[in-house]
Image (cartoon, helix red, strand yellow):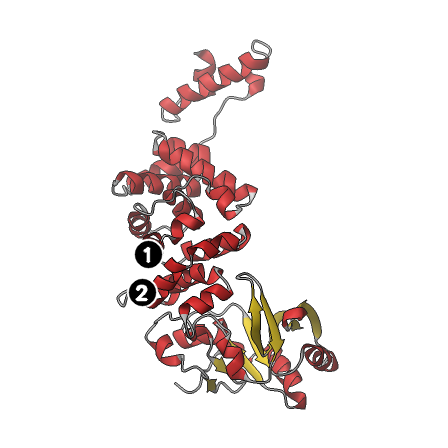
């Protein structure tokens, strides 16, 4: 394929950015996910552009065309241009001159081949001109067509430039790799030899990549291979992927969408909240899921206490961990519980009960109500 066609290329906001950057003859090339995903027939969410124009020139050209320019990463050559409310991330061609395994030192370039050589995988180093013509300086198209995730050049060199690429390798394989072709032995060997460098990564960066990995249609093969290389234990100490593949199968059986926290819950680990720097809301949800999955609470009560969505997730986790099939009747029980409302209020028991005694009596009546299958009404509960 020598050209690509896509709606995002021809929209007025994107055309305005291309026209502005090319007004004085600069090269304008789409690159990365927008090109890769278009070629694979996958959705495109972000538009990245590479150019030989220097950052200050990009800003001047944008302003001359009436576009807003935001220097989001100007020290690395990146300026975000807003056109029609759509962000376009524009980065000057560059090459690395040094790295500490997390951050690269770059110099700007006017050579697209140098820009391509500093990227991570061959499938991410394919460019396209504004007319859709493919520019493939590293011959990445054969790898993309074969859905082969392959590091550019020597895998170990690319990993030592940014150790997060070890995790990105597994994430890209889960999303774009051919599951029948397996993993690149050279890549796996390089990842296994460079595990010590993973300690340099921030937990926020690791957490962001793990989220994306676990959102993949089927992350189980990638996570299993992470474990085999030793990388999984580095990212989430104590994690065990044994129940992940069964969970993915159960999700399909139950016709439920992927939930990355549900998948994280079955991996376990000594401190996934700290290892991945989860938000408070994520940490609370993960805790509820793990606690509910490990309890003996019935489906209806799970629905009442957690709501339908989280209760289904907890029950899926439980089934995956103990090797049980999904029972569709459980969904009806969960829905019943989620819609049930405990009919007794604190004021119904006052002033006869006060303080701790009031809480204890409410809990006792709620237990009776749950054991009755939500059948006991307010009058029956108060009479008892």
Residue appearing at x 47%, y 19% in the figure: 363
Residue positioned 40% across, 79% down in the render = 140
Residue 225: mark in rendering: 1
Residue 12, horizontal then vertical, whole percent: 60, 80
Say above or below: 68 vs 273: below
- Mark 1 neighbour class, 10 Å CA radius: few under 14, some 14 to 19, many 20 or more: some
**103, above or below 136, in the image:** above
Please tell me whether mark 2 sits on a helix, a strand or a loop: loop
Say whether marks 1 and 2 touch (CB < 8 Å).
Answer: yes
Instruction: Specify the farthest residue to the bottom.
Output: 25
Task: State which quarter of the image contains the N terminus.
Answer: bottom left
Farthest residue, direction top: 352
Q: Quadrant of residue 281?
A: top right
| Vertical side of 228 occupied by 94: above or below | below
- The quadrant holding residue 22 is bottom right
Quadrant (top left/top right/bottom left/bottom right) for the C terminus: top left
- In the rendered image, residue 227, in percent from the top left (x then y), is placed at 34, 52
Q: Which residue is mark 2?
A: 183
């Amino acid at each position: 394929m020598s050209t690509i066609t896509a709606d995002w290329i021809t929209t007025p906001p994107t055309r305005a950015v291309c026209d502005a950057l090319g007004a004085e003859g600069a090269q304008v090339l789409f690159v990365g996910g927008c090109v890769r995903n278009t070629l694979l027939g996958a959705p495109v969410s972000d538009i990245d552009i590479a150019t030989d124009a220097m950052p200050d020139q990009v800003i001047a050209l944008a302003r001359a065309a009436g576009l807003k320019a935001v220097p989001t990463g100007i020290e690395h050559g990146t300026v975000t241009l807003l056109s029609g409310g759509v962000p376009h991330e524009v980065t000057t061609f560059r090459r690395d001159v040094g790295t500490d395994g997390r951050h690269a030192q770059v110099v700007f370039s006017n050579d697209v081949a140098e820009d391509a050589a500093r990227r991570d995988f061959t499938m991410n180093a394919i460019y396209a001109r504004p007319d859709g013509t493919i520019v493939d300086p590293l011959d990445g198209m054969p790898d993309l067509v074969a859905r082969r995730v392959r590091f550019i050049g020597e895998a170990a060199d690319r990993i030592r430039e940014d150790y997060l690429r070890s995790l990105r390798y597994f994430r890209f394989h889960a999303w774009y790799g051919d599951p029948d072709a397996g993993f690149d032995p050279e890549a796996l060997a390089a990842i296994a030899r460079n595990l010590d460098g993973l300690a340099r990564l921030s937990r926020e960066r690791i957490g962001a990549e793990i989220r994306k990995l676990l959102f993949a249609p089927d992350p189980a093969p990638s996570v299993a291979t992470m474990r085999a290389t030793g990388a999984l234990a580095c990212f989430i100490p104590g994690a065990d992927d044994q129940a992940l593949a069964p969970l993915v199968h159960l999700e399909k059986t139950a016709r439920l969408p992927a939930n990355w926290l549900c998948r994280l819950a079955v991996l376990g680990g000594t401190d996934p909240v700290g290892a991945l720097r989860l938000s408070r809301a994520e940490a609370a949800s993960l805790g509820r899921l793990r606690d509910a999955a490990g309890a003996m609470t019935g489906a209806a009560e799970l629905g009442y206490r957690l709501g339908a969505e989280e209760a289904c997730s907890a029950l899926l986790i439980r089934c995956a961990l103990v090797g049980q099939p999904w029972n569709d009747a459980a969904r009806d029980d969960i829905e019943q519980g989620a819609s049930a409302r405990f009919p007794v209020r604190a004021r119904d028991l006052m002033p006869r009960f006060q303080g701790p005694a009031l809480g204890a009596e409410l809990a006792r009546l709620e237990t009776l109500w749950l054991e009755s299958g939500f059948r006991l009404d307010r009058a029956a509960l108060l009479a008892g």
